[in-house]
Image (cartoon, grey):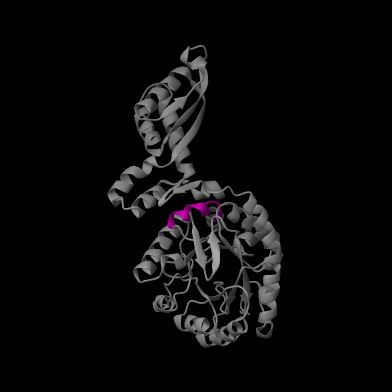
Amino acid sequence: MIEKTIAGLKVGDNQPVRIMGVINLSRESFYSGSVVKTNSVLNAAMKMIDEGADLIDVGARSTWPLAQKISKEEERTRLIPAIEQLQDISVPVSVDTMFSDIAGKALDAGADIINDVSGFTADERMVKVAKEHDCPVILMASDNVPGDPVGMDAVILSLGKIISKAEEMGIDPDNIIIDPAIGKWMPQKLPIYDYETIDALGRLRIFEKPILAAISRKSFIGETLGKPAGERLYGSLAATAIAVRNGAHIIRTHDVAPTVDAVRVAQRARARIPAASSGDVEAELLEILVQEDGARVMTSIGVTPEGSQVMKKKTVLYNILLKNITTTEALIIKQEMLARGGDAALPREAVSHEAEKVDLMIIGTGLQVERLIKKIKHQVRGLPRIASLLDELMEKNNDPFFRYS
């Protein structure tokens, strides 16, 4: 189970989804309606807290790729006075910056959390600052520049490296929050990749860290609806509800009040993770939908990389419905699946040969289905065609362009 205490705030599977309100000090932002003037920072934060915000995130540099760039000094001049205004508010404050010296000054001025969209890749000294202050850190998936991993597999690889490096350098594992970098951080980041990330957010549970989803008014919503940032609220709420349903623990938003309502309803529709414990022994039911995730879990508990790769194809169970195949083909497939440790369900009429054609349900792991395909690919009747269909089915299952375009 994922259960952490972040700057005094409990975050995790058995806690309410937390709302992070955004204080945006960047005039260069893609969403001008979110920009807060320096002399209004405290009022804006108090309004968000009254509306239900559990954390406040303060940033002064737009991470929008098309935004005009500002100097570090300009960022510091905007950011530190704003943080100082929030020293006495009742919720934790995070500072959104990629630079260690600015983060250090912000923490000294009263911030509680570092939100680094570069995932510690922009400034190697950021790790030292976070370690010295023993503060929570939000680390976004990044390889060379912020948000550059494209596709959920790349996001997971990136976060795995970032987490490992941070922990090796002394960051407390319980202080890490992960962000999958939703948004058009790179030109090649098409909307389908953001939809894939939101739909597959639960895959990030393999890291056993709180998951933050920053969705509010982002470009994939605009491209879907054909609307500017100021008209993307309803789209943001829809995407947010799906992210919560799929496992987000923290939602970062410009629009606190409506987001709170969407989050509360979505969380009620999210089933709890089955887990049990007795003394120091714990059990948790894992939902593994992608074989590589199975391998990562095995590696995390000490299974050798070689062993994990061998066994990963056994971690995902497939239920495949084949329609309108001959009784003979169905019986052959049944026997081939049984020979491989899987099974196939077929109607009584197939066993008694009372029907010429039947439907069949194949039940097996990825490895068993793979071996079935290889076996029947060169057999008689329509079995080669069935093998090709099964091959196509498995390819489509792993293709984000097919699934989300």
Q: Is residue 364 left or right of residue 109?
A: left
Q: Is residue 204 magenta?
A: yes
Residue under the image location 45 percent in, 34 percent down: 390
Residue 378 at x, y = what percent? 35, 27
Magenta: main secondary structure equals helix
Residue under the image location 59 percent in, 55 percent down: 244
Which residues, given as a range, are shown in magenta? 198-207
Q: Is residue 318 left or right of residue 220?
A: left
Q: Is residue 92 visible?
A: yes
In this rendering, the count of numbered labels is 0
Residue under the image location 59 percent in, 52 percent down: 245
Looking at the picture, does residue 346 appear above or below residue 91? above
Residue 338 at x, y = what percent? 38, 26
Looking at the picture, does residue 326 appear above or below residue 53? above
**Between 237 and 163, the one nearer to me in the picture:** 163
Residue 195 at x, y = what percent? 56, 54
Q: Is residue 209 magenta?
A: no
Looking at the picture, does residue 38 appear above or below residue 268? below
Q: Is residue 179 visible?
A: no
Residue 40 at x, y = what percent? 69, 82
**Residue placed furthest toward the front:** 279
Looking at the picture, does residue 266 appear above or below residue 137? above
**Between 173 and 152, the one nearer to me in the picture:** 173
Residue 142 placement: quadrant: bottom left
**Between 9 and 70, the one nearer to me in the picture:** 9
